[in-house]
Image (cartoon, rainbow, N blue to C red):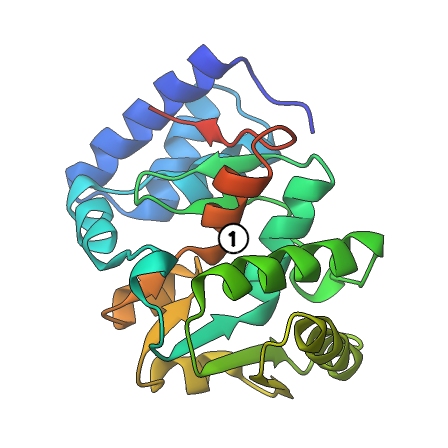
Amino acid sequence: MSLPDLVSLQQAAADFRYLLNQDYPREASLSLVGNRYDLPRNARQLLHRGVFADDVAQARRAKLKPLNTLAGQPLAIDGHNVLITLESALKGRVLVGADDGFIRDVAQLSRAYRNSPATGQALTLIAAYLSRHRPGPLTILFDAPMKKSGELAEETRQIFAAQRINADTRAVPVPERELLTFAGAVATSDTHLIDAKDLIVDLAGEIVHEELATVAQPVSLK
């Protein structure tokens, strides 16, 4: 993934952030800044995933809780969201350390996601991390319309069972619908869920920081 130099990216991010702080529309602001700095599509996606108005970023940071403070408390995991970020880290793809305190991938996989050798590695990392911090009961929801989600849910159950972790692991038509009404913390970096919920864990971000620092260094836009 070829990107402009970091200084240029950070200058573009500062301009984008300024416009957002003045309540300019997000898409128009990104287009304006992207055109001014002649940014390629992947760099624009980096800004889109990582730069937010100051008040939005502060409000989200206030909801962000470390997993080690939630032992014995209910936790729902936004399965594909967490998994894709970790797989991106394991594959050396670009991550962004966003203004709101979350680490995000910029892969834009969505419906194109397919299981890979990195899938098992990422699930093993998640299971080991959860095993150390012991939240629970656990619910893990995968997006059923995405290919082989049922198989992914079963693989997750098996890997978690090896760590003696019990979890309600399912592929469902619309994970967001259940996550929005979940009575407990939600592990995700999805902005809609973050804005709607009161208690959020950046599970993928914590694992990247603590377990993958030697292979993944998120881009900072400040």
What residue would you read off at disc 1?
204
Nearer to me, 20 or 80: 80
Count how many numbered circles sit on residues in the image.
1
Examine the image and state in which quarter residue 24 appears.
Answer: top left
Residue 25 versus residue 7 in the image, above or below: below
Query: What residue is at 31 percent from the left and 38 percent from the top?
Result: 99
Examine the image and state in which quarter residue 161 appears.
Answer: bottom right
**Side of 99 relative to 62 (left or right):** right
Nearer to me, 7 or 74: 74
Query: What residue is at 65 percent from the left and 31 percent from the top?
Result: 215
Q: State the SS at label 1.
A: helix
Nearer to me, 90 or 98: 90
- Please identify the quadrant where the N terminus is shown: top right
Find residue 112 and report its horizontal and vertical position in percent: 75, 61
**Side of 110 relative to 195 (left or right):** right
- Please identify the quadrant where the C terminus is shown: top left
In the picture as drawn, the residue positioned furthest to the right comes out as: 117
Find residue 114 and report its horizontal and vertical position in percent: 79, 63
Query: What residue is at 63 percent from the left and 76 percent from the top?
Result: 164
Nearer to me, 193 or 65: 65
Residue 149 versus residue 69 in the image, above or below: below
Find residue 82 and report its horizontal and vertical position in percent: 55, 60
Find residue 70 and report its horizontal and vertical position in percent: 32, 67
Query: What residue is at 23 percent from the left and 40 percent from the top?
Result: 20
Q: Label 1 amino acid?
A: Ala
Residue 6 versus residue 187 in the image, above or below: above
Residue neighbourhood size for the residue with mark 1, other residues' Cα within 10 Å, grouped as few (<14), some (14–19), many (≥20): many
